[in-house]
């Protein structure tokens, strides 16, 4: 019986999967390449016909507009790049504060969905359903309207003890006067964090060797606070506060949060916390009852069971969707342009209208958000890997 | 000498766990903190609700009369603003006497959408209905046929525009998303990287920047002198944006399909596309229906952003109706509450549908 030789594999045939793959990819790249060339060609042609200048050189010329609120001093004569920088700082400011607050509110909401009290459960449910089913833009517009039209004017500002004021001019509150004491307190806190971290590592090592349990929360916290207080005392224990004072239409001293900032922050926090609440609820729900019961039968207290058994497992489910909520919050902060908070989109929009450099301005917006998104995603992925199941 | 019979005391009856009173006891006054919470919330309700009731209902003005509203300001809501500006809020700048056209077109479209959501109607004629109703929608809205006056797209507005952008946004994004999701899991490196770059690029930027691009940069991309209508540009922007998010949802479903399914299909001699079409996608897509519904809700809410590039959908139409009218401008908050209610009704209905369908899909797994 003759052995039948298999048909010779022909590499340059349509029947070869590898060959087909190469062809498909070449076609796809060709189509995309042509598309990019076509769009670029049209853009250049359009710019030539309309006499549009291009390039980022405009960043160096004076901006010519004022910005409502900035961390650093800015005036109309400063160049565009400084205006963009101010916008980026404003975006990050509202995003970071928003993320912290939304995490706190959202976690409370998520835990509230498991409360023993039926009214608390119901309220948390109603909150989540209401806030996530109404567009964020609409919520921002509404908060802005409420903060600017329903609050009294500055002269009749609502106040607590004449140190905190709330009016349609914003929210004024006292801040400590920056000096040596505060600087040393900051340094002390940083040193404290380092010592506390070292202590924590040592305590965990001791626990693994001897089984002796040491506090991993209270003692490190005490170290950090103690070090900060020590720095403050070394700096002469200053107690000066800058307290806002209202004189007619102007406020002097203290710090101010403008109505625009408050509206953006409030809108973002309330909207995102509804989503975070759902994320946390799903995370807690994903840990089976048996885990809590097993922890209890091993003699762990309720708090220990939560901290050592339930939370680490819930976090594994919570972190990935939480990351995307953080990114959503950051991206949604771009809607600040609708109510005039000078974030990076708003600055870019103004610059675009003034200079006509649409491509450049939109490229800057996209670059800023891409950098933020990709770096946040990278950090959260790292944290996620750390808390993922360690499989053997 | 017989002892007198004495019965022992009866055992206490078991604690009742059913009914209203025991429910209240466990759910409202289970322990000290729970009782405190209940009482605190009730106290707050007693403090605030009567005021809210008096503002929103008891002292509210329903008459579309700005003077009456002005007098009631501070004590009662002015729902009259909604009555007065109803047409402008709901239909935007669409010519007043022709507003039956968007009404009819939107009703047809919504009816079609609802029919498409009900299993009973999943018949071949439904596809035919789509082919008929979609062009009918644009013909009714745009006019220029059968003696209907032509209405340019920049006069389209209000709820019809919102529903239209959301519907066509998702209908166009969905097939693109499936292709991109398959591409991201493809073995061909060039195709995979293209899909990854597209998805990550789009997901990394806010929708507003995509809309800016559609409105400011798109005209530059087209051949000199030719620029598509702003509505089409915005629709393309929304489609490309939501396709990236949808693709990730679909990828979640694809990843959940065990490898054995694909291997079995290949050993039966099915080609790549046959495998995807007959084995992988039916299972994967059924699994991610809730995620797809969530994307739909997100797109519906996101259509409000086109206001920022000067299109007057529901949110924009409200601004259009009230910003230029000094008599009614003070009652904008009532207008906002009205469109909030519209958005809420649509989104909440969709999320309920999503829950229902989740149950339907899960039914095959319970025995």
Image (cartoon, rainbow, N blue to C red):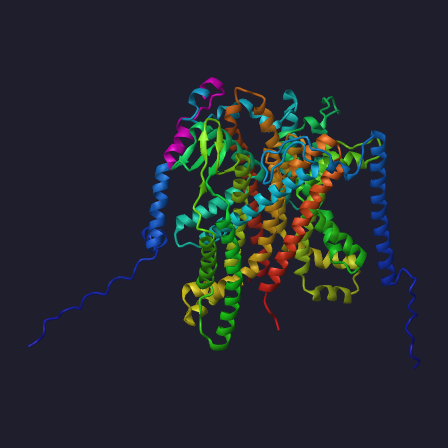
Which residue occupies the extreme left position in the image?
Answer: B1
Vertical arrangement, residue A50 with respect to residue A361, above or below: above
Q: Residue at x 54, y 46 (%)?
A: A97
Q: Is residue B50 magenta?
A: yes
The quadrant holding residue A95 is top right
Q: Residue at x 47, y 47 (%)?
A: A125
Q: Residue at x 43, y 72 (%)?
A: A298
Vertical arrangement, residue A94 with respect to residue A18, above or below: above
Answer left or right for B46 relative to A246.
left
Residue B331 % position (x, y): 50, 26
Quadrant for the N terminus of chain A, please. Answer: bottom right
Report the number of discs.
Answer: 0
Q: Is residue A63 magenta?
A: no
Residue B257 % position (x, y): 67, 61
Vertical arrangement, residue B143 with respect to residue B121, above or below: above
Magenta span: predominant SS is helix
The quadrant holding residue A91 is top right
Q: Nearer the viewer, residue B89 or B104?
A: B89
Which residue occupies the extreme top position in the image?
Answer: B67
Q: Is residue B72 visible?
A: yes
The quadrant holding residue A18 is bottom right
Answer left or right for B159 relative to A206.
right
Q: Residue at x 41, y 49 (%)?
A: A120
Residue B226 % position (x, y): 82, 31
Q: Is residue B232 visible?
A: no
Which residue occupies the extreme bottom position in the image?
Answer: A1
Residue bounds of the magenta highlight: B48-69
Quadrant for the C terminus of chain A, please. Answer: bottom right
Answer left or right for A291 relative to A54.
left
Residue A260 % position (x, y): 55, 35
């Amino acid at each position: 019986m003759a052995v039948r030789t298999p048909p010779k594999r022909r590499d340059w045939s349509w029947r070869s999967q590898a060959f087909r793959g190469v062809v498909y990819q070449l076609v796809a790249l060709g189509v995309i390449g042509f598309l990019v060339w076509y769009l670029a060609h049209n853009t250049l042609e359009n710019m030539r016909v309309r006499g549009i200048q291009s390039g980022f050189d405009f960043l160096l010329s004076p901006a010519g507009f004022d910005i409502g609120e900035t961390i650093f001093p800015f005036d109309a004569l400063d160049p565009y790049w400084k205006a963009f920088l101010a916008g980026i700082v404003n975006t990050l400011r509202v995003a970071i504060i928003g993320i912290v607050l939304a995490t706190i509110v959202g976690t409370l909401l998520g835990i509230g969905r498991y409360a023993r009290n039926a009214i608390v459960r119901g309220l948390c449910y109603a909150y989540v359903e209401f806030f996530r089913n109404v567009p964020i833009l609409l919520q921002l517009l509404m908060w802005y309207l409420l903060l600017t039209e329903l609050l009294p004017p500055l002269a009749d500002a609502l106040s607590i003890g004449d140190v905190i004021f709330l009016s349609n001019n914003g929210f004024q509150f006292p801040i400590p006067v920056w000096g040596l004491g505060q600087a040393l307190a900051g340094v002390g806190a940083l040193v404290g964090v380092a010592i506390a971290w070292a202590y924590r590592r040592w305590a965990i090592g001791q626990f693994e060797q001897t089984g002796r349990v040491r506090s991993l929360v209270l003692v490190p916290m005490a170290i950090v606070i103690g070090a900060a207080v020590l720095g403050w005392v070394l700096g002469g224990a200053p107690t000066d506060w800058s307290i806002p004072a209202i004189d007619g239409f102007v406020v002097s001293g203290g710090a101010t949060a403008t109505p625009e900032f408050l509206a953006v922050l409030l809108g973002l926090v309330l909207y995102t916390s509804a989503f975070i609440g759902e994320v946390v609820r799903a995370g807690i729900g994903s840990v089976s009852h048996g885990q809590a019961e097993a922890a209890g039968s091993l003699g762990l207290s309720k708090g220990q069971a939560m901290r050592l058994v339930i939370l680490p497992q819930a976090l594994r489910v919570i972190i990935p969707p939480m990351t995307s909520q953080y990114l959503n919050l950051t991206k949604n902060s771009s809607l600040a342009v609708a109510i005039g908070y000078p974030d990076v989109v708003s600055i870019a929009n103004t610059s675009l209208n003034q200079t006509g450099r649409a491509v450049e301005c939109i490229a800057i917006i996209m670059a800023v958000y891409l950098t933020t998104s990709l770096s946040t995603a990278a950090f959260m992925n790292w944290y996620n890997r750390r808390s993922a199941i360690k499989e053997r | 000498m017989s002892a007198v019979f004495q019965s022992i005391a009866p055992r206490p009856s078991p604690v009742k766990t059913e009914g209203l009173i025991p429910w209240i006891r466990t759910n409202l006054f289970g322990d000290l903190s729970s009782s405190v919470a209940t009482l605190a919330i009730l106290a707050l309700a007693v403090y605030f609700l009567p005021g809210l009731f008096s503002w929103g209902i008891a002292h509210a003005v329903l008459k579309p009369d700005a003077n009456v509203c002005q007098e009631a300001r501070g004590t009662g809501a002015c729902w009259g603003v909604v009555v007065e500006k109803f047409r402008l809020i709901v239909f935007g700048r669409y010519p007043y006497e022709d507003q039956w056209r968007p009404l009819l077109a939107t009703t047809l479209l919504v009816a079609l959408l609802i029919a498409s959501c009900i299993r009973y109607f999943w018949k071949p004629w439904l596809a035919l209905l789509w082919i008929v109703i979609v062009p009918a929608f644009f013909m009714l809205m745009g006019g220029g046929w059968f003696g209907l006056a032509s209405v340019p797209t920049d006069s389209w507005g209000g709820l019809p525009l919102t529903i239209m952008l959301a519907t066509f946004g998702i209908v166009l994004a969905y097939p693109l998303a499936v292709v991109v999701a398959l591409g991201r899991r493809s073995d061909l490196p060039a195709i995979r990287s293209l899909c990854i770059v597209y998805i990550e690029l789009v997901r990394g930027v806010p929708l507003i920047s995509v809309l800016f691009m559609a409105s400011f940069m798109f005209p530059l991309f087209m051949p000199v002198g030719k620029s598509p209508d702003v509505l089409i540009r915005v629709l393309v922007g929304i489609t490309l944006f939501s396709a990236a998010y949808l693709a990730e949802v679909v990828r979640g479903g694809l990843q959940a399909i065990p490898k054995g399914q694909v291997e079995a299909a290949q050993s039966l001699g099915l080609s790549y596309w046959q495998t995807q079409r007959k084995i992988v996608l039916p299972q994967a897509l059924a699994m991610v229906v809730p995620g797809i519904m969530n994307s739909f809700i997100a797109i519906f809410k996101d259509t409000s952003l086109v206001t920022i590039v000067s299109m007057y959908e529901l949110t924009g139409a409200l601004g259009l109706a009230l910003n230029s009218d000094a008599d009614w401008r003070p009652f904008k908050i009532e207008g906002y509450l009205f469109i909030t209610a519209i958005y809420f009704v649509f989104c909440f209905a969709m999320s309920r549908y999503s829950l229902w369908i989740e149950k339907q899909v899960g039914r095959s797994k319970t025995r």
